[in-house]
């Protein structure tokens, strides 16, 4: 049986490209739920997208749920006082 690649190896990124300037967030209503949302995005190395899809399949969580969890963890790690 072949060994399954680890998520850590999928995220092993050597080439760090500079980030584009932040976009201004436009608040809109999500047509499916009616809740107010804002688009948060970035152009990242394709390996991030692949790793996110794999993690989504393994956990059964949507990409949105995984990204929200990751952002909450980032805010806590950076000492943000914003309650999300």
Image (cartoon, rainbow, N blue to C red):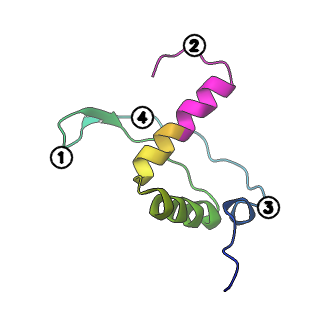
* Crowdedness near tag 1: few (<14), some (14–19) or many (≥20) residues, C-alpha within 10 Å: few
Q: Residue 25 has which mark?
A: 4
Magenta-colored span? 70-84
User: Can you identify the residue that label 2 sits on?
Assistant: 81
Q: CA distance from mark 1 to mark 2?
A: 30 Å
Q: Position of residue 24 (x, y in %)?
A: 46, 34
Seen at 74% across and 56% down, the residue is 17
Which mark is nearer the camera, 3 or 2?
2
- Can you say whether 36 is above or below 21 in the image? above
- The local secondary structure at tag 3 comes to loop
Q: Is residue 76 left or right of residue 60?
A: right
Seen at 70% across and 60% down, the residue is 11
Earlier residue among tags 4 and 3: 3
- The local secondary structure at tag 4 comes to loop
Earlier residue among tags 3 and 2: 3
User: Can you identify the residue that label 1 sits on?
Assistant: 32
**Number of dots carrying numbers:** 4
Earlier residue among tags 4 and 2: 4
Q: Is residue 74 left or right of residue 38?
A: right
**For this rendering, which residue is in front, 46 or 79?**
79
Q: CA distance from mark 4 to mark 3?
A: 28 Å
Residue 78: within the magenta?
yes
User: Can you identify the residue that label 3 sits on?
Assistant: 15
Which mark is nearer the camera, 1 or 4?
1
Q: Looking at the rendering, in which quadrant would you find the N terminus?
A: bottom right
């Amino acid at each position: 049986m072949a060994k399954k690649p680890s998520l850590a190896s999928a995220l092993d990124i050597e080439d760090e490209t500079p980030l584009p300037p932040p976009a201004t967030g436009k608040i809109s209503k999500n047509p499916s739920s009616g809740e107010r949302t804002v688009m948060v995005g970035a152009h990242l190395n394709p390996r991030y997208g692949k790793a996110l899809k794999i993690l989504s399949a393994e956990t059964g969580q949507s990409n949105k749920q995984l990204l929200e969890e990751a952002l909450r963890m980032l805010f806590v790690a950076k000492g943000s006082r914003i309650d999300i």
